[in-house]
Image (tube, rainbow, N blue to C red):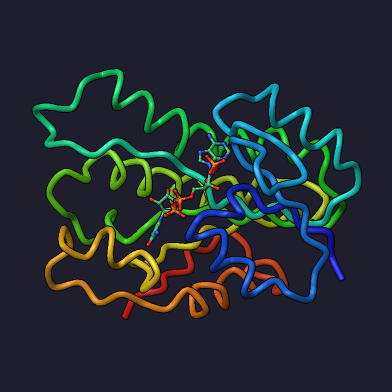
Amino acid sequence: MKTVIVIGANGAIGQAALSGLRQHRIVRANRSGQDAEHQVDISDAASLERLFERVGHFDAVVNAAGFCEYAPFLDMSEAQWRATLDSKLLGQMNVVRVGARHIADGGSFTLISGILSSKPLPMAIADATASGAIETFVKCVAFELPRGIRVNVINPTVLEESWAAYGPMMPGFQPVPGALVGKAFQRSVDGFITGQVLTVDA
Ligand SMILES: NC(=O)c1ccc[n+]([C@@H]2O[C@H](COP(=O)([O-])OP(=O)(O)OC[C@H]3O[C@@H](n4cnc5c(N)ncnc54)[C@H](OP(=O)(O)O)[C@@H]3O)[C@@H](O)[C@H]2O)c1
């Protein structure tokens, strides 16, 4: 049994991740601190530092959080771009950068991207750009992590559980069950792979 910090555990992707991590001791963290052991803001490196210090020993971090703004490119303000990149890109990079100083030998980080980086949709350019960038980050940073630390990113299509909210904006997309996405999180946490993009599409 590993101790796994799950950031954004209460969200749709967080719940999917938990379905694949039932055999582990889970430490939940999220932005509000509601229904979680810890409050954390991934866009704030000092907040991440406090989280990892408070938890102490841990074997894996699963990040299921990443805020995105949605608008047509020509209407998207710089503030909207920064909000997306500060959370889904820099925030996730900080999870690894700060967490690598605290995680156990042989530990793992699992991040989140999304299918929009390879299947573009109107209004979703910031999400798509951040997702593509975090996948490149994972492929490259895997070579630099010390002490057998691994890093992977899950790239799911839309979840069945989120279809009511996003389906109308995603014509021609086929949702997948959260439990299938949970298997990808399980492969990342319990396997030996690193630097991988685990795509879950229909
Ligand atoms: N849902 C899907 O079908 C799907 C598919 C592919 C990819 N994704 C991607 O997965 C990510 C999560 O999506 P979701 O649908 O699961 O969202 P969600 O249901 O809104 O859940 C987001 C979770 O992340 C936490 N969170 C948000 N910002 C945070 C921050 N700055 N620091 C720490 N925790 C934070 C939230 O905590 P609070 O509730 O406390 O604010 C919540 O627990 C997004 O990047 C999304 O693009 C989603």
In the image, is residue 199 above or below residue 79? below
Q: Is residue 159 left or right of residue 119?
A: right
On the image, the x and y values in percent for residue 106 come to 82, 58
Q: Is residue 42 left or right of residue 82?
A: right
Question: How many numbered markers are drawn?
Answer: 0
Q: Nearer the viewer, residue 47 or 103?
A: 47
- Image point 87% across, 71% down: which residue? 1
Q: Nearer the viewer, residue 99 or 157?
A: 157
In the image, is residue 11 above or below residue 55? below
On the image, the x and y values in percent for residue 28 come to 71, 51
- Image point 16% across, 54% down: which residue? 121
**Quadrant occupied by the C terminus:** bottom left
On the image, the x and y values in percent for residue 100 come to 75, 41
Q: Nearer the viewer, residue 33 or 116?
A: 33
In the image, is residue 48 above or below residue 30? above
Question: Most extreme residue toward the front, as rendered?
Answer: 34
- Image point 73% across, 74% down: which residue? 22
Please tell me in which quadrant of the rendered image residue 95 appears.
top right
Q: Nearer the viewer, residue 156 or 143?
A: 156
Q: Is residue 160 left or right of residue 6?
A: left
- Image point 38% across, 69% down: which residue? 159
Question: Most extreme residue toward the left, as rendered?
Answer: 74
On the image, the x and y values in percent for residue 115 come to 32, 61
In the image, is residue 184 above or below residue 92? below
